Image: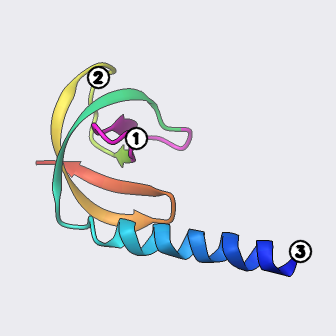
Amino acid sequence: RQMCIRDSNSAYFEVLDGQKNLVGREFDVIATEKGVKGGIVTRDDAYRYILVKEGLDLGEKARVRITESKGYYLIGEVS
């Protein structure tokens, strides 16, 4: 059982490291839903969850620059 916990922790930290490498990069996204605590959830072509605080309309496409990595999701701003 401990091996499974270590493996899942290892996978989590690999995701975190990979997400941090995306900060500063730009992606084309589409607004898919309203965020639970505000903002708009967008997805890129790799289906990454990117939260944008600017008011995009649902279904709207935009170019977004990643400003922060928050674990399993990213925060971006319309560029």
The amino acid sitting under disc 1 is: Gly
Q: Residues within 10 Å of mark 3 (few under 14, many from 20)?
A: few
Residue at disc 1, secondary structure: loop
Residue at disc 2, secondary structure: loop
Q: Nearer the viewer, residue 58 or 49?
A: 49
Q: Quadrant of the N terminus?
A: bottom right
Who comes first in sequence, dot 3 or dot 1?
A: 3
Which residue carries the number 3 mark? 1
* Bounds of the magenta segment: 36-49
The percent position of residue 28, horizontal first and vertical second, equals 17, 39
Residue at disc 3, secondary structure: loop
Res. 66 mark:
none
> Residue at the right extreme?
1
Q: Residues within 10 Å of mark 1 (few under 14, many from 20)?
A: some
Q: Are marks 1 and 2 in contact (CB under 8 Å)?
A: no
Q: Nearer the viewer, residue 21 or 74?
A: 21
Q: Nearer the viewer, residue 49 or 58?
A: 49
Which residue carries the number 1 mark? 39
The percent position of residue 74, horizontal first and vertical second, equals 38, 56
